[in-house]
Image (cartoon, rainbow, N blue to C red):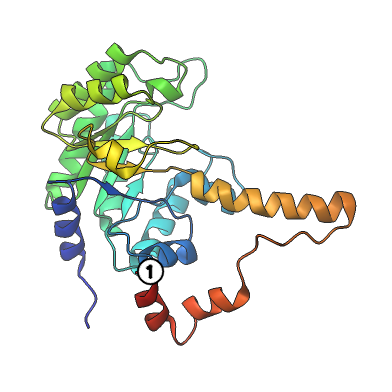
Amino acid sequence: MSRPSIADKRRTFRQLHETGCFIIPNPWDIGSARYLQGMGFKALAPTSSGFAWSTGHADNAITRDMALAHLHEIVDATDLPINADFENGFAADAAGVGESVRLAVETGVAGLSIEDSTTDPARPLYDIDTAVERMRAARLAIDRAGGDTLLIGRAECFLAGRPDLDETIARLKAYANAGAECLYAPGIRTREQISAVVAAVAPKPVNLLLGWATDWTLASVAELGVRRISVGGALARAAWGGFLRAAKELAEHGRFAFGDAASGQELNGFFGPDAARHRRALS
């Protein structure tokens, strides 16, 4: 069977946003991406934080070239649509964002998000006019490349120390008007907050971040009208959690506490010569 083309992936990705609710998990390398594909997920959104940690960097400390190489690698390694967590576009001005987005589209991603965060603690968010200008530049870059890459607009208020729902909604609506096709406000948690965001940007789809232990389920989130659910760096943090616990036991107590580790047989079975059969069994 031939692999889907980039156009096929982008078409599939857009269709996923039309009805229902789906989980778009967040791998951080080729192995985790391929395993999630084998489990039957329909699209993936590589986590920028998880990738940064895997290279020995803090979140928001990787370069644009590193991000682009990573995206290219993940797109080539999987058959699923890939959504890029493209941070703030790796540029301060709109022209720079446009150039970054052009390069990201060339990697073959099916979607990409642009944040309104600055990474400057003294001024954590771009002012609304600048943020809208940046989103318009991203929209223009995508349109010039054919327009089939989905643009996600992110309002980072709740993660930037400004948990103001009214400001968040105003920003999301402005990004929608500037060409964002899916909206995302990481950090909102309550039923009231989620419902308000969904209603405010309707009929455009909303992404909800559930990167912590919660009683929410796919079904209960879908009831609120959310179109897709991501988990951010949670899977990477879970993997790091297992590693850190085992490493601390070695370093501090001389104990070999690997009871929760995946078996080599399971991993070799998935990634080895019989991988296709094993993946079919998983999905």
Q: Is residue 61 visible?
A: yes
Instruction: Choose top left, top right, bottom left or bottom right for residue 204.
Output: top left
Which residue sits at x=39%, y=38%?
87
- Asked which quadrant contains residue 57, the reply is top right
Residue 97, visible in the rendered structure: no
The answer to whether residue 109 is above or below residue 37 is: above
Q: Residue at x 42, y 58 (%)?
A: 69
The relative height of residue 160 versus residue 81 in the rendered view (above or below) is above
- The residue nearer to you, when weighing 211 against 143, is 211
In percent of width and height, residue 243 lies at 68, 54
Q: From the image, tell me which residue sits under label 1.
A: 38
Task: Check the picture and name the quadrant holding the C terminus.
Answer: bottom left
Q: Is residue 110 left or right of residue 51?
A: left
Q: Point out the residue furthest to the bottom here.
A: 273
| Residue 66 on image: x %, y % | 47, 52
- Identify which amino acid the numbered label 1 is placed on: Gly
Q: Secondary structure at mark 1?
A: helix
Q: x and y percent of residue 269 in the render?
A: 51, 80
> Is 241 rendered above or below residue 212?
below
Q: Classify the position of the N terminus by image quarter.
A: bottom left
